[in-house]
């Protein structure tokens, strides 16, 4: 990705390579084992993906524990393939949006909506498309699944990258222009490094978020054909069908291991590495650490072996960087302001009419089969789901804010709990649904109430770990003041702690609420063997329509849900954010 | 460098330069007006002025980062139209890439012109060596002190072998001692002829720095920015701050910068007239502090500004606004580089808190038209309340949003101290009665 490591290595030894460093050390051995292991696993998984579709009929997904590691591997590969696609999408589309004002006018609102839209509902459409692309091969189904995962990962990554590109510090931008960096060099030296920390963080969030989609996308049904792609998601679907609690428990363990592995082997090292891209000029007190990153840095042979590879990349990069357009006559190519404005207006009109036409197409499509009654029904159900989300966020806040504050004010505890909270947030809650469903079935509880907690099962952790972060960052002197003046109980909460953590809480609650909407599609409907549970709500509406292949209703449901989410963001979360920014910042 | 070696070939020539800041509304703000300057070979020239006088804008126009609204800029005989390779700039904020090591930061300009990596490395190491950064090649900016960071900034500019080195307040973000070391080091290598450049053009608001380093000083005045004086400094290098001739030049510049032009009123220190005067963010504590200091011994009501500046360790950017605010409020007169307290000023100095507040309120209402204006509106209204937005709107007719906001903030702070007006931050509403 980035070409700086060689420069780094070469900088320390400008006079050729010290041969004593070629001797492998212990760390080389460990690093070698890890790299070879990952390589073998990838080749194995990739070969299976190209198998013909009929292979699935010959060896259907079975609940044999010996197959589980293989399934876990294939699921992980899908997620990383989608991550690769998301990165590609981010680098191209977000860059385009940041560079071209005309592209920005289209891309940014689209990203904003896609971010808050439950794309899960569209799975059926894309499956049909990709199966048609590769008839008879598993690859079509694989691509459909990967695409579904991609739709869960890409938007917020692109958005974060775009925002970084737009907020490149002014002085660094001036340096880049002043020394006439080519666009290529500017991207790798200035823009990509500046955006790296935000992008890494968002990639991790995306990875966690996409587990929901993995489970849904591996068990695909289009009309009568049902495809189970070998993977943890398919394993779970089969286990639920067979009412096999032991298999579900195994899947939970497998997922926990997978998350732990990619967190330790992939994300931790990247976070530790990306730390140097943080643009604050002061040395951070607490640097993120990773044993894998330290390990690689301690290896001798591995670093040397990597040198030619990185040199190759660097020289390719250098070659591209050296391609310079002949110094253009720096005539102002921009048209006169008035002409520019006219072009802008024309462009906006073009986009508006395009959007209007699309909306009309959708309305026409939906209107052909549905009536106003359906819309009213969808909105009513949306209101029900909204009620659920609101109550759940309130309940979760009541529980987690005091706990989070308690933990955050105790650094020793916080240090231990914070990684656990982050791990819980990364854990796909829908894997745990069957346990809840079994309980509901056993005790004959009302699904309208008892299915609801599932929506927040996976997202409540965002509230917890943001509150912990806020309480940890709370200034000691302010705490001392409140101790000196004997601020107690309610006063202490109202005057000291709640305002202090509010900005963090808003961030957590916003994330939790967004996630809950998305989760409603899988949480308001649940099955256990032949028993089907269903709560009244927009999520269930969409899920049911998807199941039945009722496209007009899927479109209507998704549109209504998007409208709910977008409106909620505008009237509730943004004002709260602004308030927190303006009044309650502690710096 | 020997005077006989100087040639008269202009390296930088700026003619009739003007620059407008587009507000997007009807009135554009004139930032630079009819600026002419000429930079010859082998000289160090300072653009001296207060913040907001447009001197940094001028530097950015010369470097090609900013296209001017009108006029000509030529470097080495060629018209400037975009970042030119003949100049290299040193930034006030250092502007180093935090993710690149010292060596990589220095190399960036060479990398941009596609120089082969061996040659690039050799050149960069030479520059690092020259500027005294040996041993820091693989360090990252965040590991360095401010002084070392600015050395990287210097090395990065020098390594591309520009003809002209542009420096935008290069030492103003550093502490006094570090800044002095850097200045001396830079001058040393300049006079040893080891800098691969022909001339230096630097922007500064530090009078002593300009006199210490430069052959010529161009004094900048604001609103709109233009050059009001050119001062040749013929003192031999290295210069001594305590040398009487040095002090004379500093005094002279202070006097020129506080010169009362006949056409201007005493409010003339601040741009704009009446309620539309742009007010500086000067706290009442600083005002009172300066009044007390000048009233006390040894000044006894009259103080020399260079002396004040060195006693208080204040740069002109800090000292001038305080003195001029005192002048606006009729607590002092500023003329010829001196601050002289008025009788009201001396009364203020010895008064107790209540008395001071009353005096301050009286002078605010009398001499700051915006305060009087807000007070009158509040008096007239039955509710005795008015939104700040209303006044901001009025101000924005003649000044940029930033200045309007700053001016209103200043007025709020002053009026709160004087207990004239109350202001609710949450609702943005002025009122007469004080909720406390």
Image: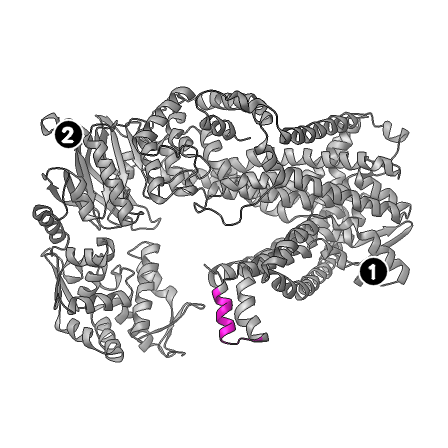
Residue B180 position by quadrant: top left
Magenta run includes residue A484: yes
**Extent of the magenta region:** A477-488
Chain of the residue under the numbered disc 2 shown in the image: B
The answer to whether residue A357 is seen in the rendering is no
Helix, strand or loop at label 2? It is loop
Q: Which residue is depicted at the point 39% across and 21% down?
A: B115
Do marks 1 and 2 share a subunit? no
Task: Describe residue A446's horizontal placement relative to residue A129 as left or right.
Answer: right
In front: mark 1 or mark 2? 2
Magenta run includes residue A208: no
Residue A524 position by quadrant: bottom right
Using the numbered discs, state the Cα–Cα distance from disc 1 to disc 2 in whole angstroms.
90 Å
Helix, strand or loop at label 1? It is helix
Q: Which residue is depicted at the point 11% across and 37% down?
A: B236
Q: Position of residue A522 (x, y in %)?
A: 77, 50
- Residue assigned mark 1: A447
């Amino acid at each position: 990705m980035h070409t700086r490591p060689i420069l780094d290595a070469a900088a320390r030894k400008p006079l050729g390579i010290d041969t004593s460093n070629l001797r492998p050390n212990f760390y080389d051995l460990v690093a070698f084992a890890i790299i070879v292991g990952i390589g073998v696993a990838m080749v194995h998984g990739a070969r299976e993906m190209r198998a013909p579709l009929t292979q699935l009929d010959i060896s259907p997904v079975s609940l044999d524990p010996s197959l589980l590691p293989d399934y876990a591997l294939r699921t992980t590969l899908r997620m990383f393939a989608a991550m690769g696609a998301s990165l590609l999408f981010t680098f191209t589309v977000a860059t385009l949006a940041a560079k071209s004002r005309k592209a920005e006018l289209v891309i940014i609102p689209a990203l904003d909506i896609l971010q808050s839209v439950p794309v899960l509902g569209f799975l059926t459409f894309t499956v049909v498309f990709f199966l048609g692309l590769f008839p008879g091969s598993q690859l079509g189904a694989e691509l459909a699944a990967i695409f579904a995962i991609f739709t869960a990962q890409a938007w917020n990554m692109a958005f974060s990258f775009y925002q970084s590109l737009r907020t490149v510090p002014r002085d660094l931008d001036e340096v880049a222009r002043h020394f006439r960096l080519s666009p290529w060099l500017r991207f790798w030296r200035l823009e990509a490094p500046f955006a790296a920390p935000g992008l890494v963080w968002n990639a991790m969030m995306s990875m966690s978020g996409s587990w929901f989609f993995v489970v849904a996308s591996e068990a695909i049904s289009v009309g009568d054909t049902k495809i189970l792609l070998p993977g943890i998601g398919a394993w779970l679907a089969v286990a639920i069908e067979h009412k096999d609690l032991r298999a579900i428990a195994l899947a939970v363990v497998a997922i926990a291991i997978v998350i732990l592995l990619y967190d330790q082997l992939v994300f931790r090292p990247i976070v530790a590495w990306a730390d140097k891209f943080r643009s604050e000029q002061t040395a951070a007190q607490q640097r993120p650490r990773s044993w894998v990153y330290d390990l690689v840095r301690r290896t001798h042979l591995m670093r040397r072996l990597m040198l030619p590879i990185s040199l190759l990349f660097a020289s390719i990069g250098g070659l591209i960087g050296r391609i310079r357009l002949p110094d253009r006559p720096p005539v102002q190519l921009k048209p006169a302001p008035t002409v520019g404005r006219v072009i802008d207006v024309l462009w906006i009109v073009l986009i508006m009419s395009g959007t209007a036409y699309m909306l009309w197409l959708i309305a026409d499509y939906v209107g052909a089969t549905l009536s106003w009654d359906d819309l009213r029904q969808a909105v009513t159900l949306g209101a029900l789901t909204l009620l659920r989300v609101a109550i759940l966020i309130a309940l979760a806040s009541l529980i987690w804010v005091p706990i989070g504050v308690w933990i955050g004010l105790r650094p020793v505890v916080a240090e231990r709990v914070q990684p656990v909270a982050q791990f819980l947030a990364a854990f796909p809650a829908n894997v745990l649904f069957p346990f809840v469903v079994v309980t509901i079935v056993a005790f004959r509880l009302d699904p309208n109430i008892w299915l609801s907690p599932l929506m927040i099962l996976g997202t409540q952790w965002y509230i917890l770990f943001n509150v912990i972060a806020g309480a940890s960052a709370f200034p000691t002197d302010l705490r001392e003041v409140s101790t000196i003046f004997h601020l107690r109980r309610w006063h202490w909460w109202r005057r000291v702690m709640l305002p202090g953590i509010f900005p963090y809480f808003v961030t957590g609650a916003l994330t939790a609420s967004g996630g809950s909407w998305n989760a409603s599609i899988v949480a308001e409907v649940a099955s256990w063997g032949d028993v089907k549970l269903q709560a009244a709500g927009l999520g269930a509406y969409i899920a049911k329509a998807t199941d039945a292949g009722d496209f007009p209703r899927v479109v209507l449901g998704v549109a209504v849900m998007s409208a709910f989410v977008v409106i909620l963001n505008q009237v509730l979360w943004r004002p709260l954010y602004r308030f927190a920014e303006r009044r309650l910042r502690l710096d | 460098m020997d005077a006989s070696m100087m040639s008269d070939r202009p390296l930088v020539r700026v003619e009739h330069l003007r620059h407008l800041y587009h507000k997007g509304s009807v009135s554009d703000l004139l930032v630079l007006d009819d600026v002419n300057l000429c930079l010859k070979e082998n000289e160090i020239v300072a653009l001296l002025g207060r913040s907001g006088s447009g001197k940094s804008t001028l530097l950015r126009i010369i470097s090609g980062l900013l296209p001017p609204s009108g006029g000509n800029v030529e470097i080495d005989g060629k018209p400037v139209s975009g970042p030119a390779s003949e100049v290299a700039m040193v930034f006030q904020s250092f502007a180093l890439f935090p993710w690149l090591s010292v060596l990589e930061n220095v190399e960036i300009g060479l990398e941009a012109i596609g120089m082969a990596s061996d040659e690039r490395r050799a050149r960069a190491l030479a520059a690092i060596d020259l500027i005294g950064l040996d041993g820091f090649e693989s360090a990252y900016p965040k590991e360095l002190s401010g002084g070392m960071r600015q050395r990287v900034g210097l090395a990065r500019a020098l390594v591309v072998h520009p003809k002209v080195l542009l420096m935008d307040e290069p030492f103003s973000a550093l502490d006094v001692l570090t800044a002095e070391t850097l200045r001396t080091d830079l001058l040393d290598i300049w006079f040893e002829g080891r800098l691969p450049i022909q001339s230096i053009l630097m922007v500064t608001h530090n009078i002593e720095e300009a006199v210490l380093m430069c052959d010529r000083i161009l004094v900048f005045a604001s609103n709109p920015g233009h050059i009001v004086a050119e001062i040749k400094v013929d003192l031999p290098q290295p210069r001594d701050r305590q040398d009487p001739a040095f002090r004379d030049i500093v005094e002279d510049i202070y006097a020129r910068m506080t010169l009362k032009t006949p056409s201007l009123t005493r409010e003339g220190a601040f741009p704009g007239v009446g309620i539309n005067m742009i007010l500086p963010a000067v706290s009442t504590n600083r005002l009172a502090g300066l009044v007390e200091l000048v009233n006390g011994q040894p000044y006894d009501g009259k103080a020399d500004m260079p002396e004040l500046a060195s006693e208080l360790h204040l740069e002109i950017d800090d000292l001038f606004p305080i003195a001029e605010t005192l002048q606006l409020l009729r607590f002092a007169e500023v003329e010829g580089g001196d601050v002289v307290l008025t009788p009201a000023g001396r009364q203020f100095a010895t008064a107790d808190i209540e008395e001071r507040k009353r005096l301050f309120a009286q002078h605010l209402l009398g001499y700051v038209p915006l305060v009087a204006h807000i007070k009158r509106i509040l008096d007239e209204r039955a509710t005795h309340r008015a939104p700040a937005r209303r006044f901001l709107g009025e101000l924005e007719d003649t000044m940029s949003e930033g200045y309007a906001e700053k001016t209103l903030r200043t007025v709020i702070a002053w009026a709160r101290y004087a207990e004239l007006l109350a202001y609710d931050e949450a609702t943005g509403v002025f009122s007469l009665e004080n909720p406390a």
